[in-house]
């Protein structure tokens, strides 16, 4: 074991055209715990999250400066497709491909040439769906359309799709905001299980959710990371006035 964090960001700025959305953010992210990004709407949580697997590259006016490393290697020098296999993403609204449940999960391993044949692919599909807590519900209907599942099942399918290419980090951008409370609870349990194996970063609007699922929390405000620490400390004993104002509901 080395002390190199799974991901580290140093002095990261993000601009959309002339407008600065992220200002000098530095943070380390590790496997074994969930890191929550919280803060008022528009503070830059999603922008910073997207910079961790270079999804901002897909926005022509976005520009990222500073350095972000994965296992000590600068992600700006990596192939973005390979990077996004290692740093997967789950979005707000479940977005399965218009394909079967099986194909949704097999797609990534296929384009990355991971499976040697059908048997190996079957195994990857089963393992990924099992880890995403969906296997028992879909094992008899793998050829049904992914879009025919319930919202919560679709989100677990999207998590299975991310897991199928053996990521090291999973970025989740408000993964429960389109789900009902029961489906949300199921995803939160899943996040708790997945953290043993992957570094997980979750953007959430809900402080209750951050308190339930994360061990580390970063509070963002106006593009800056104001405070970062153990979730229990940040919520019970915030060090910064702005954090205190936010968690006590003075603005948000
Ligand atoms: N594609 C874009 N083009 C231009 N500006 C953008 C773009 N995406 C975000 N921004 C701006 O960057 C700032 C940060 O937005 P971002 O979506 O990262 O915040 P957020 O904290 O995730 O907000 P929310 O909680 O509302 O999702 C905002 O001022 C937003 O208007």
Image (cartoon, rainbow, N blue to C red):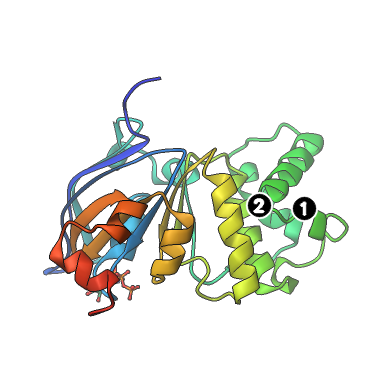
141, 207: nearer the viewer: 207
Distance from Cα at disc 1 to Cα at disc 2: 8 Å
- The residue singled out by tag 2 in the image is 132
Graded by Cα atoms within 10 Å as few (under 14), some (14 to 19) or many (20 or more), the crowding at tag 2 reads: many
Horizontal and vertical percent position of residue 119: 81, 36
Query: Residue farthest to the top?
Result: 1
The quadrant of the image that shows the N terminus is top left
In this rendered view, identify the residue nearer to me: 179 or 141.
179
Query: Is ligand 1 closer than 8 angstroms to the Cβ of mark 1?
Result: no
Residue 231 higher or lower than 99, as above or below: above
Q: Residue furthest front?
A: 236
Give the residue at x 58% y 74%.
Answer: 179
Query: Looking at this view, is 7 or 38 the one in front?
Result: 38
For disc 1, the neighbor class at 10 Å (few under 14, some 14 to 19, many from 20) is many
Residue 89 location (% of width, % of height): 48, 55
Q: Which residue is mark 1?
A: 135
User: Where is 132 relative to 147, above or below?
Assistant: above
| Residue 223 position within the rendered picture, expressed as x and y whole percent measured from the top left | 18, 64
């Amino acid at each position: 074991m080395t002390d190199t964090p799974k991901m580290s960001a140093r002095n990261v700025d993000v601009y959309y055209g002339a407008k600065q959305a992220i200002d000098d953010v530095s943070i380390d992210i590790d496997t074994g715990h969930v890191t929550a990004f919280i803060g008022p709407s528009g503070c830059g949580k999603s922008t910073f999250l997207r910079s961790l697997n270079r999804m901002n590259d897909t926005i022509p006016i976005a520009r990222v400066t500073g350095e972000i490393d994965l296992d000590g290697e600068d992600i700006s020098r990596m192939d973005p497709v390979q990077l996004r296999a290692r740093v997967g993403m789950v979005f707000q609204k479940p977005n399965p491909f218009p394909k079967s449940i099986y194909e949704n999960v097999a797609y990534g391993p296929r384009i990355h040439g991971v499976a040697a044949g059908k048997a190996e692919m079957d195994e990857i599909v089963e393992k990924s769906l099992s880890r995403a807590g969906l296997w028992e519900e879909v094992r008899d209907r793998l050829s049904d359309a992914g879009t025919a599942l319930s919202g919560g099942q679709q989100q677990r399918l999207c998590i299975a799709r991310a897991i199928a290419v053996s990521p090291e980090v999973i970025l989740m951008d408000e993964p429960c905001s389109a789900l009902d409370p029961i489906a949300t609870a199921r995803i939160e349990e899943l996040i708790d299980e997945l953290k043993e194996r992957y570094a997980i970063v979750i953007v959430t609007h809900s402080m209750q959710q951050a308190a339930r699922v994360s061990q580390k929390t970063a509070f963002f405000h106006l593009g800056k990371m104001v405070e970062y620490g153990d979730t229990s400390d940040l919520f019970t004993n915030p060090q910064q006035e702005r954090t205190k104002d936010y968690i006590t509901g003075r603005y948000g």
